[in-house]
Image (cartoon, helix red, strand yellow):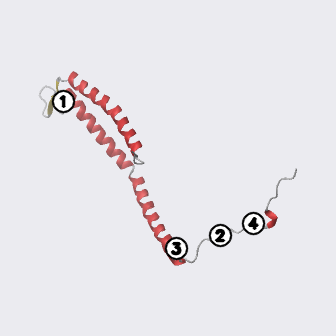
Amino acid sequence: MTAAPGSAGSLLRKIVAALILVPLGIVLVAFAVANRQIVTVSFDPFNAAHPAASVTLPLFALVIVLLIVGVVIGGSASWLRHGRWRRTARRLERDLGNLREELNRHKRAAGAAASIPEAAAPPELLKLGPPVQ
């Protein structure tokens, strides 16, 4: 039974992901069970007793929502920061395609008759003889 060339890397990636995600899931479930208390998040800085805008939810839900929002904000910032590199990569890919087309045009123009010349034998003077004893 032969495996595909990329399957070893894929299997290793799945094992590493499982070794990271399973304990992370266990910790997340334990955190959720330990922090089921209801909290009120107020968005009104002027009236703490009766806020105009507030949300009441379990503490673990608040933490998970804030983590998700943080990941989204961080991913967006990273994506925006790397825009210059994506633009450069697209330009280089376009240039590479143009150069390959030009190379193919030159190969077709040269034709099949013109081939790379064989390496010439070195002149007699440059050949080394056996070592003298």
Q: Which residue lies furthest to the front in this view?
A: 1
Is residue 14 shown left or right of residue 68?
right
Q: Residue 122 carries which label?
A: 4
Which label sits in the foreground, 1 or 3? 3
> In the rendered structure, which disc, 2 or 3, sits on the residue that comes first in sequence?
3
Is residue 16 shown left or right of residue 96?
left
How far is the residue under mark 1 from the one under mark 3? 70 Å
Name the residue at 30% across, 31% down: 22
Tag 3: amino acid: Lys
Q: Which mark is residue 107?
A: 3
- Point out the image quarter for the N terminus: top left
What crowding class fits label 1: few (fewer than 14 Cα within 10 Å), some (14-19), or many (20 or more)? some
What crowding class fits label 4: few (fewer than 14 Cα within 10 Å), some (14-19), or many (20 or more)? few
What crowding class fits label 3: few (fewer than 14 Cα within 10 Å), some (14-19), or many (20 or more)? few
Q: Position of residue 127 (x, y in %)?
A: 79, 62
Residue 22 or 35: which is nearer the viewer? 22
Tag 4: amino acid: Pro
The answer to whether residue 131 is above or below residue 43 is below
Q: How many labels does the image show?
A: 4
Quick check: marks 2 and 1 in contact, CB under 8 Å? no
Q: Position of residue 108 (x, y in %)?
A: 50, 76
Q: Mark 1 points at which residue?
A: 41
How far is the residue under mark 2 from the one under mark 3? 18 Å
Q: Position of residue 80 (x, y in %)?
A: 35, 49
> Secondary structure beneath disc 3?
helix
Q: Name the residue under label 2.
A: 118
Q: In which quarter of the image is residue 29?
A: top left
> In the rendered structure, which disc, 2 or 1, sits on the residue that comes first in sequence?
1
